[in-house]
Image (cartoon, rainbow, N blue to C red):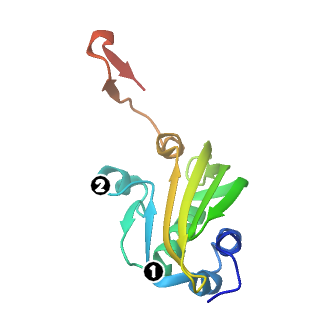
Amino acid sequence: MSSTTPTEVVSKLLKNTLNPEVVRELVAPDATYVSLNYDNPDLTKILPYAGSHTKAGPQAIIDTFATVNRIWANEAFEIQTLFGAGEDVAVFGSFTYRSRSLGQVSVSPFSIWCKVNEDGKVTYMQFMEDTLGSTDSFKKGGQKQYVVFEEKGEIEI
């Protein structure tokens, strides 16, 4: 049993996402990581790390944050609150990323849900953000058409 609390484990993980040794220390070998959605092939064309990485362990988190660092410059990552109950830890905050390809900025809220076992290892991590906003930092041109309410017609973005 670990003397470190689940909130301390998650806080340390978030401060060290680009340090593979620390990620391996804190994440269980069979941990599941869910990034942005469960399964969206169109989104993974833009953000290859998106989706469920079932029992992929620390490597899924290492690969995700290395890719995020490669495609965006992190201008701010602010945790506004982090709290836990038992094995569950919730994190809420915001980030400002600038796409390295086009220099466009994305400001987004984020939320993270983690489960930490008795050994102080993260066994589950789910990271959510404003995915439409963050992917727009890579948008070069073109428009998409949406119909939400038939009576209101199409929305173009």
Note whether 40 is above or below 64 in the view shown: above
Q: Quadrant of residue 49?
A: bottom left
Query: Which numbered disc covers residue 103?
Result: none
Q: Quadrant of residue 54?
A: bottom left
Task: Name the foreground residue: 61 vs 100.
Answer: 61
Helix, strand, or loop for circle 2? helix
Q: Quadrant of residue 37?
A: bottom left
Seen as rendered, the residue at the extreme left is 150
Note whether 17 is above or below 30 in the view shown: above
Q: Residue at label 1? A: 57
Q: Quadrant where the C terminus lies?
A: top left
Note whether 68 is above or below 142 in the view shown: below
Task: Name the foreground residue: 144 vs 19.
Answer: 19
142 relative to 102 in the view: left or right? left
**Residue type at the position of mark 1:** Gly
The residue that appears at 37% across and 64% down in the rendered structure is 52
Task: Name the foreground residue: 87 vs 121.
Answer: 87
Earlier residue among tags 1 and 2: 2
Helix, strand, or loop for circle 1? loop
The residue that appears at 51% across and 52% down in the rendered structure is 128
Query: Which numbered disc covers residue 41?
Result: 2
84 relative to 76 in the view: left or right? left
Seen as rendered, the residue at the extreme bottom is 1
User: Within 10 Å of the Cα at label 2, are there few (<14), some (14-19), or many (20+) other Cα atoms?
Assistant: few
Mark count: 2
Please state the horizontal and vertical placement of residue 72, each as a whole percent of the image. 60, 56
**Residue type at the position of mark 2:** Pro
Please state the horizontal and vertical placement of residue 9, each as a whole percent of the image. 66, 75
Marks 1 and 2, Cα distance to the nearest angstrom?
A: 21 Å
Please state the horizontal and vertical placement of residue 102, each as a whole percent of the image. 57, 47
Point out the frontmost of discs 1 and 2.
1
